[in-house]
């Protein structure tokens, strides 16, 4: 005889699972959900206790005079370099992020006392309880997204301004999580797991128009080192064409250049391993390739 486990899942665990899935929603799906919730009869019934607002400090394109988005964008928003926006004004050169869609900055403020009293009634409709849960999920996602975006603007400012891979700094999601937890004004838990789920579905546009995934803003040291080794070997071609270099660089020479020019200390075997990962041959093979300089 087959037996089934009838134990109910813990409410706290269930809430974490629901939130994890909600954070992983693609942006367009998230936008449709916000629109559906706000157009529901349940939302209308809750309006006396719910105020629709916008995240403090967040700006949407149409608020800043940009052309409004007709449809939800798969990109969270675009970074603007204030120095370029307002040349000659003495602007500090900070970065500003403009969201593409109102749904991405939506925040609901509750009359908690009124909501608690309403929910305590035995005839409180389950439909309204579901709407309230979705509104709180939207708040959590948007608050965490905005806090994460502001932290990244500071941590990766050089890369976000230039778009140059060499400007990327090693940064882990655990480090960002620790920074966000220190902020007293953040009302949601910013653990690495939640951040990881968010960055998988988010991308942003740089000032030059290039779109980059948010996950790419959290490179491991090895990924950063790959950019530098690749850059030096690509520069090697230019030096040889200009006859400043007679033969390709050895791994030891690359190590010396990285330390002298960029203050980056790597072992020779580390450079060799990175070359292998990038499918770049050693200096002997590069010198024998007839099409090397034309590549």
Image (tube, rainbow, N blue to C red):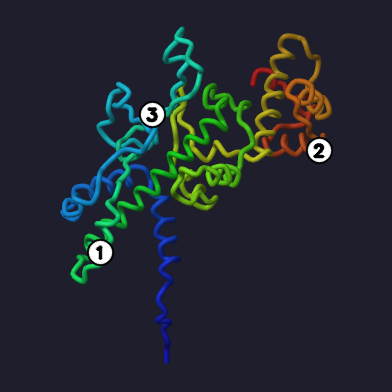
Which structural element holds mark 1? Answer: helix
Furthest toward the bottom, the residue is: 1
Which structural element holds mark 2? Answer: helix
In depth, the one of 109 and 105 nearer the eye is: 109
Mark 2, mark 3: which one is toward the viewer? 3
Q: Residue 42: name its quadrant.
A: bottom left
Query: Is 290 positioned to the left or the right of 70 in the image?
Result: right
Q: Position of residue 275 (x, y in %)?
A: 72, 34
Label 3 sits on residue: 98
- Identify the residue shown where x is 55% and y is 27%: 157
Label 1 sits on residue: 119
Q: Position of residue 247 (x, y in %)?
A: 80, 18
Query: Is 46 positioned to the left or the right of 249 in the image?
Result: left
Query: Is 70 positioned to the left or the right of 159 in the image?
Result: left
- Identify the residue shown where x is 44% and y is 29%: 205
Label 2 sits on residue: 269
Q: Earlier in the sequence, mark 2 or mark 1?
A: 1
- Identify the residue shown where x is 39% and y is 53%: 22
Q: Earlier in the sequence, mark 1 or mark 3?
A: 3
Relative height, residue 87 to residue 260 (above, below): above
Total number of numbered discs in the rendering: 3
Mark 2, mark 1: which one is toward the viewer? 1
Which structural element holds mark 3? Answer: strand
């Amino acid at each position: 005889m087959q037996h089934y486990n009838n134990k109910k899942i813990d409410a706290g665990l269930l809430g974490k699972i629901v939130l994890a899935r909600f954070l992983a929603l693609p942006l367009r799906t998230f936008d449709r959900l916000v629109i559906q919730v706000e157009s529901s009869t349940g939302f209308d019934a809750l309006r006396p206790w719910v105020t629709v607002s916008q995240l403090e400090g967040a700006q949407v394109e149409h608020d800043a005079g940009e052309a409004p988005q007709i449809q939800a964008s798969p990109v969270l928003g675009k970074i603007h370099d204030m120095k370029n926006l307002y040349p000659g004004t003495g602007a500090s050169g900070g970065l500003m992020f403009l969201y593409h869609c109102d749904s991405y900055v939506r925040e609901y403020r509750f009359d908690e006392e009124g909501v608690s009293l309403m929910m305590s009634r035995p005839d409180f409709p389950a439909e309204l309880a579901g709407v309230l849960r979705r509104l709180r999920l939207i708040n959590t996602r948007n608050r965490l997204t905005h806090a994460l975006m502001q932290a990244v603007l500071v941590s990766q400012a050089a890369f976000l301004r230039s778009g140059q891979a060499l400007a990327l700094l090693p940064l882990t999601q655990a480090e960002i999580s620790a920074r966000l937890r220190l902020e007293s004004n953040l009302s949601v838990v910013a653990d690495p797991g939640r951040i990881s789920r968010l960055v998988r579905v988010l991308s942003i546009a740089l000032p030059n128009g290039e779109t980059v995934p948010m996950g790419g803003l959290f490179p491991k040291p090895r990924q950063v080192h790959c950019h530098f080794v690749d850059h030096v070997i690509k520069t090697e071609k230019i030096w040889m064409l200009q006859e400043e270099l007679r033969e390709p660089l050895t791994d030891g020479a690359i190590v010396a250049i990285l330390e002298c020019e960029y203050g980056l200390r790597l072992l020779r075997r580390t450079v060799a391993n990175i070359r292998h990962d990038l499918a770049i041959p050693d200096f002997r093979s590069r010198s024998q390739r007839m099409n090397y300089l034309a590549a």
